[in-house]
Image (tube, rainbow, N blue to C red):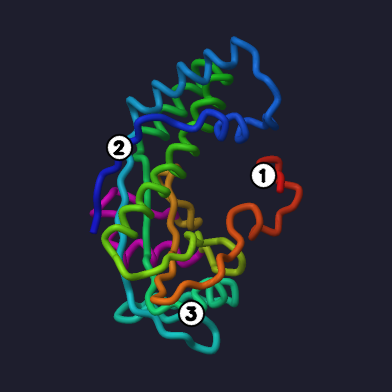
Amino acid sequence: MHADIVLGQLDKNEALRYMGHRGEDIDEQLDKLITKCEKEVLSCVKPRFVYKVCDISREEKGILVKDTNLFLTGNSIKKHLDGCDKAVLMAVTISADADRLIRIAQIRDMAEAVAIDSLCSVAVEQACDRAELIIKEENPGYYQTFRFGLGYGNLPISLQGQFLHVLNAPKQIGLNVSSTDMLTPTKSVTALIGLSTTQENCHQKGCEVCGKKDCIYRRES
């Protein structure tokens, strides 16, 4: 299944966090810049997503996604999908227009470029949140885990190509992968969500599951 997503507004505080702000007051000039750039981003991006619900099988070295050639290796994804009957494969992008907007801003004004880049990161995260809600609505009777991105923990990012192939993402939403396993357009996300008929304890997510403790974008606990 694939669909478009409409974003009405962006979380400016989250964009400021990406820009290195830690909750301190911002001046009028920065506030105007963020507001101006938010309008540019919202008028430019075209959020889309595709997902597929798959049966899974637990193997000694990882998770087999049935009826595909995709094998999810590592203990991180095994733990994430513990107790789950199925897995949702999802991919989200806000389109190549976002990349072009950032490149143009980099030539024009670096302050704008930083703001636009941060707001685009917020846009793709909000699109992912919206996609999760749609998936939940379309798959009643299941509890969902949080989304677990390729490259998190010890789930190899080198699986990007196979992952996108299973979703037919290049054709469905124009999402591809480079020879270095980077997504193009860059403002895109690939992730897995576990589905279970029984409610499990919530796992940690986001910054809590990441081992990079010195990241400048890390949320404070």
Q: Identify the secondary structure beneath mark 2.
A: loop
Quadrant assignment, res 144: bottom left
* Pointer 2 or 3: first along the chain: 2
Is residue 63 shown above or below 171? Answer: below
Q: Report the residue at 36% width, 78% height from top.
A: 69
Residue highlighted by disc 2: 6
The verdict on residue 174 being magenta is: yes
Residue highlighted by disc 3: 83
Is residue 79 shown above or below 48? Answer: below
Give the spatial CA distance, label 1 vs label 3. Answer: 28 Å
* Pointer 1 or 3: first along the chain: 3
Is residue 14 shown above or below 212? Answer: above
The verdict on residue 67 being magenta is: no
Residue highlighted by disc 1: 219
**CA neighbours of label 3 inside 10 A, class few (<14), some (14 to 19), many (20+):** some
Q: Report the residue at 32% width, 65% height from top.
A: 165
**CA neighbours of label 2 inside 10 A, class few (<14), some (14 to 19), many (20+):** few
Residue 163, given in percent of the width and then of the height, sits at: 39, 65
Q: Is residue 195 toward the left or the right of residue 15 in the image? A: left
Image quarter (top left, top right, bottom left or bottom right) of the N terminus: bottom left
Residue 94, given in percent of the width and then of the height, sits at: 37, 40
Give the spatial CA distance, label 1 vs label 2. Answer: 26 Å
Part of the protein shown in magenta: 158-178
Judged from this view, the residue extending furthest toward the bottom is 60
Residue 133, given in percent of the width and then of the height, sits at: 36, 53
